[in-house]
Structure formats: C-alpha cells, structure tokens
Amino acid sequence: YYHASPQPLTDKILKNEKMIEQIKNWINPSKAYMRCIITTQLEEELAEKLGIPLFANPSRLSSWGTKHGSRDVFQQAKIPLPNGFSEVFTEDDFVSRILDLWNSSPENQTKFVAKLNDGVSGDG
C-alpha cells in the first residue's frame, strides 16, 4: 500500500531511515553518485543523507530546464524559436491560445504541437 502511493519515490526513501541505511550499506560512497534529470530538494536531501555527490542542476534552477523556462531564456537571448505560448494551464486557455496563434497567421499555421512543461525523455 505505502509503496504504491503516488508520492515521489525519493520522498518515500527519505521517510524510511532503515531504507537509507540499507542503501548506504550497498554503495561505495567514494565511487557512488546520484544523477537526476529533474532535481528537487528531495534529491538534494537524499544525496546529502547518503553522503554522495548529486550530479544535476540545483533545484533552485529547475524552472530554467522546463519548456516554459527554455522559451523564456530563448526569448531573452533573442534566439529564434517557433511561434507559441508558455504557461497555459487550463483547457480554455489552451484553446484560446491556439486560436490566437491561428488567427495571427492562418496561412502559416497548419500544425500545432502541445508540450507538457515537466515531461522529459519523450514524455513531454
């Protein structure tokens, strides 16, 4: 029951001191490290408790690794990117933004792509 909960795995591990000790016994801290694609404070805390380095971007910078953050960085750096919108969170806003995009240049808008902000490895 507990392990089937939707709670993040790292959070489950952090709440189980026995598991943390077991992991520490399995690893060689001089050779072990954690690598994460998306880092939260939970992964930072777990790496610290395990006494191993975390090879990942700091969680305080995680917004820059999202699709919204990437669009913002590209726009600030004046890097060309496809027309689109960021930070659309409701179905109504999504439909409204697609219509805005279509109406801005209907002759050039034949396909649209919607990407989930936090998805990675093909899940976004």
Image (cartoon, helix red, strand yellow):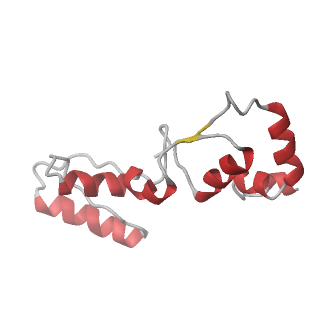
Q: x%, y% of residue 117?
A: 43, 55
Q: Is residue 35 above or below residue 66?
A: above
Q: Is residue 72 above or below residue 108?
A: below
Task: Locate residue 53: give its quadrant.
Answer: top right
71 left or right of 58? left
Q: x%, y% of residue 58?
A: 49, 52
40 left or right of 18? left
Pick the residue in front: 72 or 24.
24
Tally of marks: 0
Q: Is residue 108 above or below residue 84?
A: above
Q: x%, y% of residue 42?
A: 64, 56
Residue drawn at 52 percent across, 48 percent down: 38
Residue drawn at 54 percent across, 50 percent down: 39
Q: x%, y% of residue 64?
A: 37, 54
117 left or right of 113? right
| Image quarter (top left, top right, bottom left or bottom right) of the N terminus | bottom right
110 left or right of 36? left
Residue drawn at 51 percent across, 56 percent down: 59
Residue drawn at 59 percent across, 58 percent down: 41
